[in-house]
Image (cartoon, coloured by chain):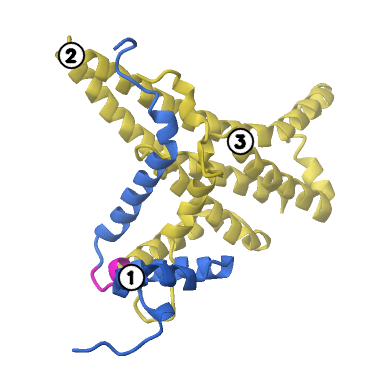
Chain colours: A yellow, B blue
Amino acid sequence: MMLNFFDQFASQSLLGIPLIAIAMLVPWLLFPSPYKRWLNNRLITFQYWFISRATNQLMLPLNINAHKWALILVALLLFLITLNLLGLLPYTFTPTTQLSMNMALAVPLWLATVLIGMRNQPTHSMAHLLPEGTPTLLIPILIIIETISLFIRPLALGVRLTANLTAGHLLIQLISTATFVMLSFMPTIAMLTFIVLALLTLLEIAVAMIQAYVFVLLLSLYLQENV
Amino acid sequence: MADKPVTIAQKRLLDVKLAELPTWMTSCDFTPNGILSAMRRGHDRYYNKYINVKKGGIGGISMLLAGYVILSYIWEYDHIKHDRWRKYH
């Protein structure tokens, strides 16, 4: 029985090296770079197929100026997917449960899209603050609301990722504790809870991938408006 | 069959005799560059043996992930040893 369910989110350090540092380096180990051969090994071929499909999908709605962002967006997608999925292994640490890290990813990228829009086409990006066809009386209020919604975007990006992953990990821990405790005196209920746990783990795998995708997709949408 | 005479610094760990172990350890390169190149060599050996093969399966990556799980357990041991089944034993 854990003394405190939130202790799994505090990164432990051994010999002065925090576990979060190792956890953030593991995705680099898992994606080897392709080399100059006609046929690479299976791992690289599979990753290359996935990366090219993802880049194609992501860059489809964006115009040619935004294609400069292809590398950083796809790298971000791979990083987040790998971090989230690795966090589902036992005893591992998920860096994306830390709000500090997600805000560090969200705020600079969002700010970059806004500044690019303001610099290259200021009228066009200002025009996004007022949707078409609004009644004249509502214009001042709507501009204020749209500005607030613009500034809330990085907060929403970071907090969405953090909250989804933290909630998932906590739920898995709670339900597994319940299963263990009930195994001795109520085995049938424990079996039902175990089935819930199995389904929840499947959901978590899906959520891990979906959240990474949503993060990158929204960034590409903000980029699309501004470039 | 006699071994070729090589300097002790060039031998791999498994070829070093027990009596020669202290001299081998002192001849190791413990500078950051040396450590990095040793890690690079280890990584390349693992990669070329298990992943960079014609019909690599799931085993190469699974061993890596299992090693990562064990490493995380070692890192968190100081904290995990406080978990227990009953409040009073």
Q: Is residue B38 left or right of residue B84?
A: right
Q: Is residue A53 left or right of residue A16?
A: left
Residue at the image position 50 percent from the left and 59 percent from the top: A55
Residue at the image position 34 percent from the left and 55 percent from the top: B64
Instruction: Please say whether residue B56 is one of the residues in the magenta stretch.
Output: no
Same chain, marks 1 and 3?
Answer: no
Q: Is residue A154 left or right of residue B71?
A: right
Which span is picked out in magenta? B49-55
Residue at the image position 71 percent from the left and 30 percent from the top: A149
Label 3 and label 2: CA atoms lie apart by 41 Å
> Could you tell me the amino acid type at mark 3?
Gly
- In the rendered image, which residue does mark 1 sit on? B19
Q: Is the residue B35 above or below the residue B5 in the image?
A: above
The secondary structure type at the circle numbered 3 is helix
Residue A66 on image: x %, y %: 65, 58
Circle 3 marks a residue in which chain? A
Q: Which image quarter holds the C terminus of chain A?
A: bottom right
Dot 2, crowdedness within 10 Å: few (<14), some or many (≥20)? few
- In the rendered image, which residue does mark 3 sit on? A158
- In the rendered image, which residue does mark 2 sit on? A184
- Seen from the viewer's position, the closer of residues A124 and A115 is A115
Circle 1 marks a residue in which chain? B
Return the mark for residue A60: none
